Image: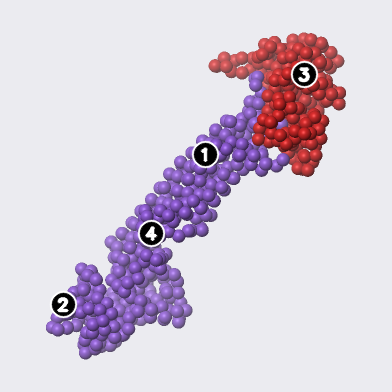
Chain colours: A red, B purple
């Protein structure tokens, strides 16, 4: 499903090269739920961005469903992402001038779905996350927990096979965090592959597998399952 | 969700920025429209003033010289009056006024004056209309608007434009010197070569030979001269644009047995003034386009910078770079349209209000400027927004993540 082969990412900082990720090799099977943990600056988000086709590696290859992502051009990767990947962000990244309903419609619009279908699907998803009565609210009129639920509904709009979540509980209270992780478990049970970057050990524990990074290097998993998660 | 929803909502999300950018376009277009509007009517006023400098092309008998023209010397020769008909019936463009004349010396109370026969314009027009062709079947006036409310409608147009609308065969106009020497005034009677004429107007002092002329109908002067159907000059007020495009040569080819003399200084003055007006207008246009364009580009760059997280989110959700480009260009198009329409309306009101005060000319709305205003506004907004929009389209979607 998701595969990284000897991937390295190097940034230039004031003329000196800084390795964000060094020789990472990972294979994540379809239907897995993986948490990625490690201290700040360890390369967790870099890894997530690369899996999502948003950040090209300095060397190495990244595969999604057998397709080498960085052999595609930017627009082809965007197209691939639209069909296969759902993103969730720590700060939700809702579009501030659109209602909750319209925010959920955005991925459907990008996938060129008809407005009628967009509306029907978005309403269904907002009902699923318990926001039927908040559909016409602007993000600024919602609590942070409600905003993250809108982001979760948006994430599912195009029924992606892979969910990439960057600190999805980072801004939430413990109770809401538990609900969000529960939601990830639920969609994982439905067969979706979930990769979640987190600082929260309790959230990480609820994943099937954990990937630990330090200084851009992947260490052994906390709970390695060699059948699903391969770390080199 | 449609693209227009995405663009329309964003425009109203940042109201202060919207007002600033809209004002930049609106004011730029307003200034362009008002300047073009006032300039257009000022140019017409200047063109009219230039016409008052008098004839700028003379058609003389082959043997005559300019000296003969200035002294109204009938001995210098004559040419057939038919030449006037040839000019009137020709397809030459740029003949504003055509005035044939025949001069002869006369003595009144022992003093020598010049009797000059002229043909009123009305008779030309009747003849040209009857024949269905010729210069008077086309618009006259080098594009000027002689019927504007402030245009002088006095009987003294002979002095200014070398033509008179109407003149009966027993009527005469007398020059200022003639009138003072003979003590003549309007509606007096004067006898010339045994024929009585009624003075319809005393012409104002010009400082030229015209001051010692008596003008009467050409037909009557021809009878009195006994020379037949001849004239000794055709004074032409030609449009300076057409003169610069070879009108003199064309008249020469039409009348090969006559001498065609352009008044170079007058033509040059007219052309210089037209160039000056056109250049002034162009300079303003260029300045405003640069200033307005820079304002819009600046706003768009700031807008892209502010929206980079939102753009990154759209890209993470699968938006192509072309879509991001289109979102920004559609916004520019909407701003351009609104600025163009608003700028035209405001600019027209401004021109109509300030034109009479600043330029001393009445200004009327010019619908053609609406099209130009919208076109300039939209093209300017699109051009100025293109590079910021391209920058947005090439934005790194990683900007959506906090930790990189």
Q: Percent position (x, y) of residue B363?
A: 43, 59
The reply, left or right, for residue A173 in relation to residue B45 is: right
Identify the residue at horizontal 33%, vertical 65% (top origin).
Answer: B51
User: Pointer 3: what residue?
Assistant: A175
The residues tagged by marks 3 and 4 sit, at their Cα atoms, a distance apart of 77 Å
Q: Position of residue A112 (x, y in %)?
A: 74, 40
The x, y position of residue B249, in whole percent, is: 36, 68
- Which residue is pictured at 65% across the width and 31% down the height? B310
| Alpha-carbon span between mark 2 and mark 1 | 71 Å
Give the image location of residue B172, x and y in percent.
27, 81
**Distance between mark 3 and mark 1 Cα atoms:** 45 Å
Same chain check for tags 4 and 2: yes
Dot 3 falls on a residue whose secondary structure is helix
Question: Mark 2 vs mark 1: same chain?
Answer: yes
Labelled disc at residue B361: 4
Q: Earlier in the sequence, mark 4 or mark 2?
A: 2
């Amino acid at each position: 499903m998701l595969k990284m082969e000897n991937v390295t990412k190097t940034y230039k900082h004031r003329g000196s090269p800084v390795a964000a990720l060094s020789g990472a090799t990972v294979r994540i099977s379809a239907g897995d739920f993986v948490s990625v943990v490690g201290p700040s600056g360890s390369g967790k988000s870099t890894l997530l961005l690369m899996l999502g086709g948003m950040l090209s590696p300095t060397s190495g290859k990244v595969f999604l469903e057998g397709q080498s992502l960085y052999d595609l051009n930017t627009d082809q990767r965007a197209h691939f992402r639209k069909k296969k990947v759902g993103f969730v962000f720590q700060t939700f990244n809702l579009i501030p001038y659109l209602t909750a309903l319209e925010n959920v419609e955005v991925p459907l619009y990008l996938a060129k779905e008809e407005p009628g279908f967009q509306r029907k699907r978005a309403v269904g998803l907002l009902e699923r996350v318990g926001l039927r009565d908040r559909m016409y609210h602007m993000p600024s009129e919602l609590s942070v927990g409600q905003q993250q639920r809108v982001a979760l509904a948006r994430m599912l709009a195009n029924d992606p096979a892979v969910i990439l979540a960057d600190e999805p509980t980072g801004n939430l209270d413990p109770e809401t965090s538990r609900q969000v992780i529960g939601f990830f478990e639920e969609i994982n049970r439905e067969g979706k592959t979930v990769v979640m970057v987190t600082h929260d050990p309790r959230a990480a524990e609820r994943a099937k597998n954990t990937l630990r990074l330090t200084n851009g290097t992947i260490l052994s998993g906390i709970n390695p399952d060699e059948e699903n998660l391969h770390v080199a | 969700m449609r693209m227009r929803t995405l663009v329309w909502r964003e425009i109203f999300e940042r109201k202060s920025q919207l007002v600033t950018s809209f004002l930049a376009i609106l004011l730029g277009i307003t200034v362009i429209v008002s300047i073009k509007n006032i300039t257009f009517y000022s140019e017409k006023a200047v063109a009219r003033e230039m016409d008052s400098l008098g004839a700028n092309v003379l058609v003389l008998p082959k043997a005559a010289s300019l000296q003969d023209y200035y002294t109204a010397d009938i001995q210098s020769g004559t040419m057939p009056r038919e030449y006037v008909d040839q000019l009137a019936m020709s397809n030459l463009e740029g003949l504003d006024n055509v005035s044939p004349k025949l001069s002869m010396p006369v003595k009144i109370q022992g003093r020598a004056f010049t009797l000059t026969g002229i043909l009123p314009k009305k008779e030309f027009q009747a003849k040209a209309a009857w024949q269905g062709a010729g210069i008077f079947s086309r618009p006259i006036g080098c594009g000027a608007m002689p019927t504007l409310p402030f245009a002088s409608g006095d009987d003294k147009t002979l002095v200014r434009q070398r033509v008179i609308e109407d003149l009966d065969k027993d009527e005469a106009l007398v020059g200022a010197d003639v009138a003072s020497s003979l003590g003549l005034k309007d509606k007096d009677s004067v006898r010339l070569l045994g024929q009585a004429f009624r003075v319809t107007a005393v012409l104002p002092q010009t400082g030229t030979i015209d001051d010692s002329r008596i003008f009467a109908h050409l037909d009557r002067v021809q009878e009195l001269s006994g020379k037949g159907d001849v004239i000794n000059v055709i004074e032409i007020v030609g449009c300076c644009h057409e003169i610069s495009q070879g009108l003199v040569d064309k008249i020469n080819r039409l009348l090969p047995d006559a001498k065609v003399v352009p008044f170079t200084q007058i033509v040059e003055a007219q052309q210089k003034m037209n160039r000056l007006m056109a250049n002034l207008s162009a300079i303003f246009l260029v300045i405003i386009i640069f200033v307005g364009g820079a304002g819009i580009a600046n706003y768009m760059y700031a807008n892209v910078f502010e929206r980079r997280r939102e753009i990154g989110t759209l890209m993470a959700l699968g938006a192509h770079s072309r879509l991001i480009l289109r979102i920004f260009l559609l916004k520019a198009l909407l701003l351009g349209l609104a600025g163009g329409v608003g700028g035209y309306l405001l600019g027209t009101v401004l021109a109509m209000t300030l034109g009479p005060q600043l330029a001393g000319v009445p200004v009327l709305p010019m619908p053609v400027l609406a099209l130009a205003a919208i076109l300039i506004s939209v093209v300017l907004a699109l051009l100025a927004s293109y590079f910021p929009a391209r920058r947005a389209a090439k934005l790194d979607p990683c900007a959506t993540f906090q930790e990189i």
